[in-house]
Image (cartoon, rainbow, N blue to C red):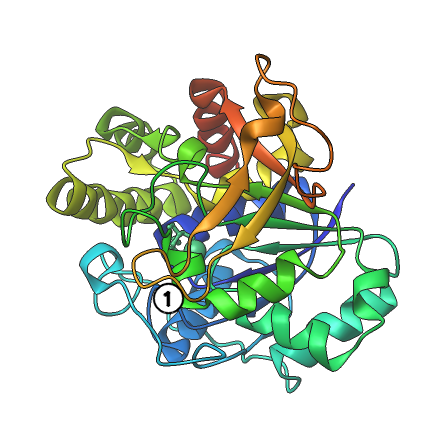
């Protein structure tokens, strides 16, 4: 079973990723970061979700803002609390003493060669951990990223939210030399809960599924308002699902660079797909060295069905 640490900014889709990972993988820890909402909110939300689902997993608080500039939040999507739409239990548990940066380092050292880190929010914690402990890159098995896009962004025409929030951090992660698996909006936009899917959760009458249904009703309504979408995109679970159901997403090896200075393109993941086109013979000297497996195709319906089945296993 894959040993996983999730760095997240809960966030409605982060919540689904946590519940999925806890059931299918060896979830050794959760670290929180600024992103969908303030660090205070994302940390409280992570604790409340663990309380709701009965997850006995250590949670460590991380960075309050990006390496450069100020934090960007998404209240228009996730609400003021970062997880609007349902009343979550007041968490009895606390975060661990360790800062998320040190927690990532200590877990990687403890599980040397085995640990996969899923970064499903801005990558500030992981970037600082890689800087603080140069051996970390050699200890990690893989980094699985929800972030970026091989096509268009969501915050700007070019940039996806997680990368946009901290491009310098993403650049540090993508140049770390650790094997990277990246799923971007080009795939995640196609994987979402419809209102019928949310209704399947509610109809179960199960406590956790009912709370998730309330949360996803809110999230779906915001997606309609903000993007005219009729789906609640499950961005984050796409970063962890391949470790349980590897056949559902297909990838291409390619060079990914992070734009940090473009006036119009800051936060863009520049994915060199030229080498993947069947009709071109790109001389190796022109294609950048591949540093990531980038998601290109997904079986959306089976993916969402596996996620619903998993949520329905909770009490
Ligand atoms: O762009 C989508 C990503 O930004 C997801 O991780 C979502 O939770 C937000 O963090
Ligand atoms: Ca997220």
Place of residue 265 in the rendered image (x, y in percent of width and height, measured from the top left) = 35, 55
Would you say the beta carbon of the disc 1 residue lies within 8 angstroms of ligand 2?
A: no
Q: Residues within 10 Å of mark 1 (few under 14, many from 20)?
A: few
To which quarter of the image does residue 199 belong? top left
Place of residue 181 in the rendered image (x, y in percent of width and height, measured from the top left) = 64, 42
> Which one is nearer the viewer's eye here, 98 or 175?
175
Place of residue 95 in the rendered image (x, y in percent of width and height, measured from the top left) = 56, 79
Place of residue 270 in the rendered image (x, y in percent of width and height, measured from the top left) = 49, 46
What residue is rendered at 43% in x and 58% in y? 162
What residue is rendered at 77% in x and 68% in y? 107
Residue at the outermost left position: 225
> Which one is nearer the viewer's eye here, 314 or 19?
19
> Which one is nearer the viewer's eye here, 208 or 261?
261
On screen, residue 73 versus residue 222, left or right, reads right
Residue at the disc numbered 1: 89
Q: Note whether residue 315 is visible.
A: no
Q: Note whether residue 44 is visible.
A: yes
Q: Secondary structure at mark 1?
A: loop
Q: Is residue 261 above or below residue 224?
A: below
To which quarter of the image does residue 284 belong? top right
On screen, residue 204 versus residue 58, left or right, reads left
Q: Is residue 5 above or below residue 241?
A: below
Q: In which quadrant is the N terminus drawn?
A: top right
What residue is rendered at 47% in x and 58% in y? 259
What residue is rendered at 46% in x and 37% in y? 150
Q: How many marks?
A: 1
Residue at the outermost bottom position: 97
To which quarter of the image does residue 251 belong? top right
């Amino acid at each position: 079973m894959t040993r996983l640490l999730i760095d997240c900014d809960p966030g409605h889709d982060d919540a689904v990723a946590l519940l999925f990972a806890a059931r299918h993988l060896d979830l050794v820890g959760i670290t929180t970061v600024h992103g969908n909402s303030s660090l205070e909110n994302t940390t409280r939300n992570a604790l409340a979700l663990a309380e709701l689902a009965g997850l006995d997993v250590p949670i460590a608080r991380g960075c309050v803002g990006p390496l450069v500039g100020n934090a960007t939040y998404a209240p228009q999507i996730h609400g003021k609390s970062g997880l609007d739409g349902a009343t979550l239990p007041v968490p009895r548990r606390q975060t661990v003493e360790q800062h998320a940066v040190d927690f990532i380092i200590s877990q990687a050292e403890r599980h040397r060669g085995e640990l996969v880190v899923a970064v499903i929010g801005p990558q500030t914690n992981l970037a600082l951990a890689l800087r603080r402990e140069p051996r970390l890159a050699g200890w990690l098995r893989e980094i699985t990223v929800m972030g970026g896009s091989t096509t268009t962004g969501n915050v700007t025409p070019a940039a996806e939210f997680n990368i946009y929030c901290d491009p310098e951090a993403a650049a540090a992660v993508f140049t770390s030399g650790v094997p990277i698996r990246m799923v971007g909006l080009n795939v995640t936009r196609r994987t979402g809960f419809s209102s019928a899917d949310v209704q399947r959760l509610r109809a179960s009458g199960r406590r956790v599924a009912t709370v998730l249904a309330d949360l996803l009703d809110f999230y779906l309504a915001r997606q309609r308002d903000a993007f005219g979408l009729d789906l609640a995109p499950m961005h984050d679970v796409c970063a962890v699902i391949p470790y349980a159901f590897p056949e559902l997403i297909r990838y291409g090896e390619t060079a990914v660079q992070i734009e940090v200075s473009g006036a119009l393109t800051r936060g863009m993941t520049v994915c060199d797909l030229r080498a993947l086109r069947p009709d071109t013979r790109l001389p190796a000297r022109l294609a950048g060295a591949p540093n990531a497996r980038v998601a290109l195709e997904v079986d959306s319906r089976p993916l969402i069905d596996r996620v619903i089945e998993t949520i329905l296993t909770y009490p």
